[in-house]
Amino acid sequence: MGVDTKSNAVVRKPAAHPNTWVFFGGDFARYNDVKLGLMTHALHYGTAVFEGIRAYWNEKKNQLFLLEAAAHYDRMHRSANVMRMRLPYSTEELVNFTVELLRRNEFKSDVYVRPLLYTSSEEIGVRLHNLDRGFFIYAIPFGNYVEIEGGIRCMVSSWRRVPDQALPARAKITGSYAQAALAKSEAVEGGFDEAIVLSVDGHVSEGSAENLFMLKDGAFITPPVTDDILEGVTRTLLMKVIKDELNLPVVERSIDRTELYTCEELLLCGTGAQISPVIEVDRRPVGNGKVGEFTQELQNIYFGAVRGDTPKYKDWTIPVY
């Protein structure tokens, strides 16, 4: 919807989203049949929690593989508890709803699934208590969130990560992503691909919406959960792959900004970002300025697993069809 500047008339634009199946209010409905009120509390105050879940299409197997859905819904239960909310379904029920949603939409491409638990009361007033909640899941065809092949160029953002004492990073709260948006736009409009955000005390926290690993002195190092990071599902998977497949140690410790300039390899990871090699930080090359050998190997292992091509990691995914 927009405004005709000559007549001040409201001009309705066609819906950009296809009229797919969604899960809303405890049942399946069509996307365009779902309506939210203008006064919905979550829209005004960021009082919602969400997840991002991927499903990968395997053309050769004619199969769609849903990735780590249970781990995401377990985290969503924890996020809800932080915000004094309660998911009305068990993790098992939520996984089943998601599989059914994907089947109904008959997707034959990579897909991004977005479940959201939100404060649905239509009233003015900042608080968490004595309010109604709503829940939905929708899914869309989805490609790469950031570059994953040639590598990306990052800047260390001037915006700091919101500390746990103010807004808990370990919960995926919609309101907290305003900080991520500030950092991302600053980076992209400054000529970079992505932002790396520091904690209030100056340690490396994460990307605008990704966890971070760096290779230094024969070990992969990642910030600890106490440095205001989201406890990432993909981060957990990679920690295991690095130990089991690359035979390298994983160290969780605080990282100084200048270590980003002197490490051998650097990558950002997340369900949306997948595994994105970083080849430059603050106009300084990482290593030789190309995608690192170990990062490339991690990508190969990861994408084989998520597309259902690696029997060893079949427990990561659920075949949808």
Image (spheres, grey):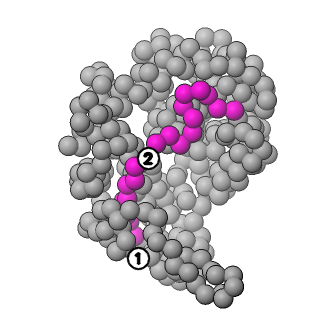
Q: What element carries label 2?
A: loop
Magenta part of the chain: 134-153
**The magenta stretch spans residue 290:** no
Find residue 139 and report its image quarter.
bottom left
- At x 59%, y 49%, the residue is 169
Horizontal side of residue 199 vs 103, given as left or right:
right
In the image, what residue type sits under mark 2?
Answer: Phe
Q: Is mark 1 on a helix, strand or loop?
A: loop
Q: Which of marks 2 and 1 is nearer the N terminus?
A: 1
Location of the C terminus by quadrant is top left
Find residue 24 and report its image quarter.
bottom left
- At x 61%, y 87%, the residue is 9
**Where does residue 109 sit, x and y in percent of width and height?**
35, 43
**Of all residues shown, which one is farthest toward the front?**
6
- Residue depth check, mark 2 versus mark 1: number of the one nearer the observer: 2
Q: Which residue matches tag 2? A: 142
Tell me, for residue 270, which label it has, or none. none
Q: Which residue matches tag 1? A: 35
